Image: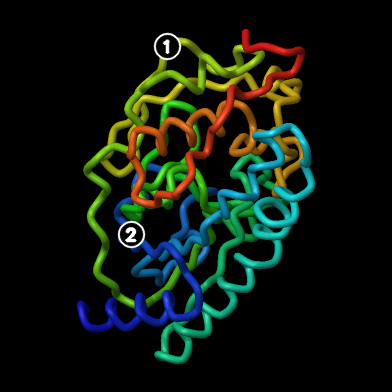
């Protein structure tokens, strides 16, 4: 198992995966059936989460209030619909070349299903959509921070994920035991419309507990600070990585050295702009 796991990870990194994490099926015990990867592939023995980093420079247009499209091109639509799916396709080939089946899973938000009726008694209605944030935590890649974004110790909030469900018996990665989020509250303070709840609630994924603020999606959609429409579901939670809250999180993590990826220049070199001229 260990040798196969090393070969798989080496192969995935060789085709461009910046992040690779593995979870065993038992880490999905208790999730709703229409979010359980075992419903997609009952013979599954492992779930692999692969990620590609978002270039920090793709957020510069939002940070300066000068250009929204560069984020879409290189971190939004471009990364989500081209670069990461291409990586996922080649990742399935890595597993198949080793003789294992791999089911590629596009990270649609779980709220987009069901879209059909069960095909047989006892079966789940289509579509089964595992939660990519849950899967990334279950695969040991990071945690969900106070702002509700998936944070990794390498890149903070700057990555996109896809999943593979496979019958290969791989060695699961341990859950991330540290903490990227230090509960600083900058995401709350810099949200122009107070869309994040002041009091967090505790959530648990595969035994890992995290404090997360609830999000008022209606308020979030009216933000105007750089958030983008959800690539996977236009009616879903907006993409908040380039918004005031996401950029506040990124700036804080870099300023405090809480992420491994560091740059010669700070992300935030001047006071951030806000819709209407100031934060709430």
Q: Which of 272 and 205 is in front in this view?
A: 272
Residue density around tag 1, few if under 14, some if 14–19, many if 20 or more, within 10 Å: few
Task: Return the residue at label 1.
Answer: 199
Q: Nearer the viewer, residue 118 or 75?
A: 75
**Point 41% across, 38% down: residue:** 254
Q: Where is residue 77 in the image (x, y as percent from the top left)?
A: 73, 55
Q: Point out the frontmost of discs 2 and 1.
A: 1
Q: Give the vertical position of 16 relative to 60 (above or below).
A: below
Q: Position of residue 200 (x, y in %)?
A: 41, 17
Residue that lies at the very extreme toward the top in this rendered image: 280
**Point 39% across, 47% down: residue:** 152
Residue 23, labelled with which disc?
Answer: 2
Q: Which of 70 and 106 is in front in this view?
A: 70
Q: First in sequence, mark 2 or 1: give its number.
A: 2
The quarter of the image holding the C terminus is top right
Q: Where is residue 96 in the image (x, y as percent from the top left)?
A: 48, 87
**Point 40% across, 49% down: residue:** 262
**Point 47% across, 58% down: residue:** 37
Give left or right: position of 89 versus 132: right
Q: Quadrant of residue 144?
A: top left
The quarter of the image holding the N terminus is bottom left
Q: Position of residue 117 (x, y in %)?
A: 69, 51
The Cα–Cα distance between marks 2 and 1, rounded to whole angstroms, is: 31 Å
Give left or right: position of 94 versus 45: right
Give left or right: position of 2 versus 9: left
Residue density around tag 2, few if under 14, some if 14–19, many if 20 or more, within 10 Å: many
Q: Which of 10 and 203 is in front in this view?
A: 10
Colour approach in the figure = rainbow
């Amino acid at each position: 198992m260990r040798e196969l796991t090393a070969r798989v990870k080496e192969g995935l990194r060789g085709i461009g995966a910046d992040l690779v994490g593995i979870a065993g099926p038992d880490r999905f015990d208790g999730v709703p059936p229409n979010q359980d990867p075992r419903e997609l592939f009952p013979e599954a023995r492992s779930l692999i989460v692969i990620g590609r980093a978002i270039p920090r420079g793709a957020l510069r247009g939002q940070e300066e209030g000068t250009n929204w499209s560069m984020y879409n091109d290189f971190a939004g639509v471009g990364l989500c619909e081209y670069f990461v799916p291409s990586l996922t396709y080649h990742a399935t080939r890595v597993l198949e070349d080793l003789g294992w089946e791999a089911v590629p899973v596009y990270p649609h938000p779980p709220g987009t299903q069901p879209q059909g009726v069960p095909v047989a008694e006892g079966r789940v209605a289509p579509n089964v959509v595992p939660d990519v944030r849950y899967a990334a935590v279950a695969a040991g890649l990071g945690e969900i921070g106070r702002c509700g974004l998936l944070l990794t110790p390498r890149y903070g909030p700057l990555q996109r994920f896809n999943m593979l469900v496979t019958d290969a018996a791989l060695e699961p990665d341990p859950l991330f035991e540290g903490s990227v989020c230090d509960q600083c509250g900058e995401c709350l303070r810099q949200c122009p419309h107070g869309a994040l709840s002041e009091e967090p609630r505790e959530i648990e994924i595969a035994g890992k507990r995290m404090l997360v603020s609830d999000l008022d999606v209606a308020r979030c959609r009216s933000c105007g600070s750089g958030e983008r429409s959800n690539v996977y579901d236009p009616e879903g939670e907006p993409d908040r990585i380039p918004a005031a809250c996401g950029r506040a999180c990124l700036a804080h993590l870099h300023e405090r050295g809480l992420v491994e990826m560091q740059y010669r220049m700070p992300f935030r070199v001047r006071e951030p702009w806000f819709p209407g001229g100031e934060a709430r």
